[in-house]
Image (cartoon, rainbow, N blue to C red):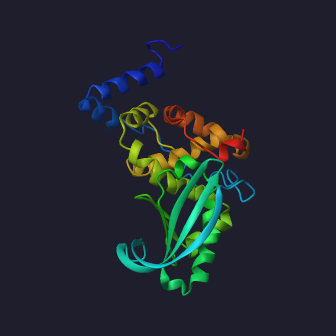
């Protein structure tokens, strides 16, 4: 039970204020964010063992579907363009659950076989991340090039050059996909929600400078990975990281708790 003076009661009160349309109160609350410097610059590097290649995947296979013209975003040009892409149907399945995702691969890879090798490398990794992060996922874009991954617009964007090699070398490929898929499946519903604004306000801090500097675009993705770590994989996370996350963003953690997300296959293998 909480009392009227507790932080959680105040949190609920702020949510009620949002529900009443108190936009002025919302802006006032957000103006006071981040009274302390964030503890981290970014979060994808903090728990490289959170999800590993030894963990289960819901990836069930891939089938070549020929070539077809698709509109794809390429970070190298920072623009959308039409490509006669190699197309693949990726299947994720587990019991009664089945999901199909179209992988669209830049023809620069030169052949269907070379393109399929890229899909077969990355698609099983995506199958290890929580299912809730794939709920809005419809397509994968795969390009060559030295650019970071991306997420959003029902898509995950992959560039297979130096950034990808760095993610792999550091053991954070799965964690990077968690971050990017949070953009894809969580941002549209939650990044602008009243409850999330309330949680930001009462935490008054950000978990990373990346989240602080991009509060509407990166805070969900930066924080969700840490929620997954401390709530569902704490045994694989350094104790100091566990403590810092729990004490820095407790209201955001509570917000994610309240969503009751489907974390399979991850939730079934981690205490």
Give above or below for 2 relative to 259.
Answer: above
Q: Position of residue 52 (x, y in %)?
A: 71, 56
Q: Which of 130 and 217 is in front in this view?
A: 130
Find residue 88 and report its image quarter: bottom right
Query: Seen from this angle, which residue lies furthest front?
Result: 96
State the image quarter where residue 74 is shown. Answer: bottom left
Q: Quadrant of the N terminus?
A: top right
Looking at the image, which residue is at 34% across and 23% down?
A: 16
For this view, does 119 lie left or right of residue 270? left
Q: Residue 28: horizontal and vertical position, in percent?
A: 29, 32
* Residue 48 percent location from the top left of the image: 67, 55
Q: How many marks?
A: 0
**Nearer-the-camera pick, 231 or 129:** 129
Q: In this view, does 221 lie to the left or right of 267?
A: left
Report the quarter where the C terminus lies: top right
Does residue 94 lie above or below 259 as drawn? Answer: below
**Residue at the bottom extreme?**
110
Residue 24 makes an appearance in the image: yes
Q: Where is residue 77 in the image (x, y as percent from the top left)?
A: 38, 77
Q: Residue at x 44, y 12 (%)?
A: 4
Q: Quadrant of residue 26?
A: top left
**Is residue 209 in view from this perspective?**
no
């Amino acid at each position: 039970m909480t009392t009227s003076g507790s932080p959680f009661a105040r949190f609920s009160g702020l949510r009620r204020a949002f529900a009443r349309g108190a936009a002025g109160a919302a802006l006032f609350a957000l103006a006071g964010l981040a009274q302390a410097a964030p503890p981290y610059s970014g979060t994808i590097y903090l728990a490289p063992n959170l999800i590993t290649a030894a963990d289960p995947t819901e990836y069930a296979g891939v089938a070549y579907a020929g070539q077809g013209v698709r509109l794809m975003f390429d970070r190298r040009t920072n623009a959308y363009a039409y490509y006669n892409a190699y197309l693949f149907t990726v299947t994720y399945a587990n019991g009664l659950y089945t999901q199909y995702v179209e992988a669209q691969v830049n023809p620069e890879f030169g052949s269907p076989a070379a393109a399929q090798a890229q899909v077969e490398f990355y698609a099983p990794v995506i199958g290890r991340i929580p299912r809730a992060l794939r709920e809005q996922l419809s397509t994968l874009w795969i390009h060559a090039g030295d650019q970071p991954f991306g997420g959003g617009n029902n898509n995950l964007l992959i560039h297979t050059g130096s950034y990808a090699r760095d993610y792999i070398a550091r053991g954070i490929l799965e964690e990077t996909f968690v971050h990017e898929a949070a953009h894809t499946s969580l941002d549209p519903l939650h990044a602008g929600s009243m409850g999330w604004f309330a949680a930001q306000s009462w935490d008054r801090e950000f978990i990373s400078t990346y989240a602080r500097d991009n509060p509407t675009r990166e805070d969900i993705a930066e924080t969700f990975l840490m929620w997954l770590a401390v709530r569902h994989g704490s045994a694989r996370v350094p104790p100091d990281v566990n403590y810092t996350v729990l004490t820095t963003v407790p209201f955001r953690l509570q917000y994610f708790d309240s969503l009751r997300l489907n974390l399979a296959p991850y939730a079934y293998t981690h205490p």
